[in-house]
Image: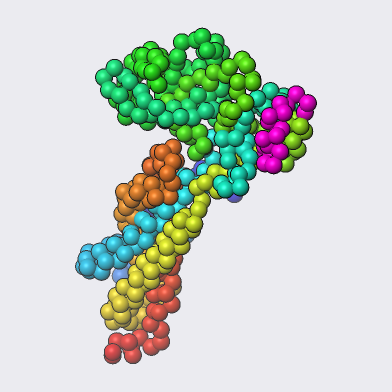
Amino acid sequence: MSPKRWLYIVPLRLRSLFSRQQVDDELDEELQYHIAMKTEENEAKGMNPKEARRAALISLGGLDQRKEECRDARGLNWFADRRRDLAFVFRSLRRSPGYASATIATLALGIGAVTAILGAVDQTVLRKPFPHYERCAVFGADSPHYGFISNSYPIQVMPCVERGKSFEAFALSAWGRGTMDTGKETFGVDYGAVNKDFFSVLNEKPALGRFFRPDEFTASSSGVVVLKHSFWRGYFGGDANVIGRSVVVENRSHQIVGVLSKEFSAPTLFRGDVFMPLVLASDPLSLQSRVLTAMARLRQGVTVVQANAEVSVLCAAPDATPNFKERYKESPLYLKSLSDKESETHFSKIHGAFLGAVGFLFAIACMNAVNLMLVRLSGRRRELGIRCALGSPRARMISLIITESFVLNFIAGVFGLLLAWAVKPLITKILTDSRELFERANHIDGRVLLLAVGISLVSTIIVAVVPSWKLPAGDPQSILRE
C-alpha cells in the first residue's frame, strides 16, 4: 500500500475508533438513503409504498447485517471487543471488591518484590557506571590470605608501567579517613587524593566549579578540594555559593573549587566524599613503602592478557628498583578487568539467595492469583453457560479472562512499583556496603519501569492460562442444570 493511501486510511480508522457513535450515525443515514432510493425505484415499477420498502430491505440483505459488514470492513472490531471486555471486567470487579482486592494485593507483592530485587541487582552489578568501563582494569597483586588486593600499586614502579603502549590513561588515588572543619562544625570524611587524569578516566564533568589545574599537583600549591554531590547536598545544603569557601581537611586549609555531578559513579575501590590533588614527592627512594590504588584504561583493541604481558616486561626492566623486584617476586603485579573485580565485590551468595527467594515468592503469588481466579470461575459457571447457549465462542470467553487478568495485573503492577520504590533502598543496603552503589540504586528509572511492565505481562499470561484451560466445555444445557 502506498504512503499516500496510508495517509488517507489512517485518519479514517482513527475517526472510526474514537468517534464511533458519529460514524455509526453517518452509516445509518447512508443506508437509510439507499433504502429510500430503492423504495422510490420500486414504486416507479408499480409497487405500493409498503411493498416497495419491504422489497428494498430484502434487496439490501438486512439492515443490521449490512451495518456489521461495514464495521468489519473498518478492521476495528478487535478494538471494539476489547473496549467492551474492559467495561465488563471493571463492572464485574466493582461487584466483587473482596476478590479484586485479594488478587491485586497478592500480585502486587510478587511484582513489587521481583522489581525491587532485579532493579537493585541491575543498578549495583550489571549496569556500566561510566563509558569505556569494559576497557578499564585495576592493578593489584595476590595475597595468600586475602586474594587479589587492588591497593598494591607501588609508586616507584609508576614511571616504568606508565610508558607502556597498552595504556591510554591512568586513574591513581590514595584514600584515607579524616576530619573536615567548615568553621561551623567538624565531622568525619572519607577523602581521596587523585591524579590529574582521574576524573577524565571516569568521564566525569563538574556540576559546579572546576576540577584541579596542573599547577595544583605540587607540594607548594595551596590546598583545593572537590566535593561529591551527595556530600555537598548533605553537609552544605546544596548551596551553589560553596565554590571558593575554605574548609580544613586533616589540619590543612583547602579551598572548595568544584562539586561532582549527581550521576558520578566511581567503582567501589574509589570511595570518597572529598577529592584533592595527589601530590607525589620528587625523591622516589622515599616512596618505596607507599602504594596507590590504580586503574588503567586500555587502548582500543588491547586485551587485559596483552596488557599483563607488557606489565611483566616493564616490571622486569633494569630501571625497576631492586626493592620492588624483591617485593613482587612471589606475587607479581598484574591487571584485573574492572568488570571482573566489581562483580566479585558486589555479586555474592546473598544476591543469588535473594534472586532465588524472590523467584519463589513470585511463583507463589501467581499460583495464589490463579487459585483465586479459579474459585471465581467456578462461581460464574452459570453465566458462562448462558454465554455458550447464546452462541458465544470459547475464544471470546478466553479473551474475557485474559482481559480480566490484564486489568488485575496492571493495577497490581502500579502498586508493585510503589512497593519496589519503598523497599529498594533497604534491599540495596543489604546487597552492598558501597555508598556510591546505594545512591545509584536508590531511585526508579526507565529500565526499572520497563522491568515492572515486563514482569506484569509475564504475570498476566501465567494468571490467564490455567483459568482459560479450565473453562467449562460441552453442552451448555448440562452446565445450566447444575
State the scheme by which the image is colored.
rainbow
Foreground of the two, 473 or 292: 292
Q: Position of residue 22 (x, y in %)?
A: 32, 51
Can see residue 472?
yes
Q: Quadrant of residue 288?
A: top right
In the figure, residue 342 lies in which quadrant?
top right
Left or right: residue 328 versus residue 394 is right
* x 31%, y 48%: residue: 422
Which one is in front, 29 or 162?
162
Relative vertical location of residue 258 with respect to residue 105 in this rendering, above or below:
above
Range of magenta residues: 317-334
Vertically, is 61 above or below 113? below
Q: Residue at x 45, y 16 (%)?
A: 224
Q: How many marks?
A: 0
Give the x, y percent position of residue 465: 44, 71
Question: What residue do we see at 44% from left, 21% from top?
Answer: 226
Q: Is residue 451 left or right of residue 315?
A: left
Residue 107 horizontal/vertical position (percent): 34, 62
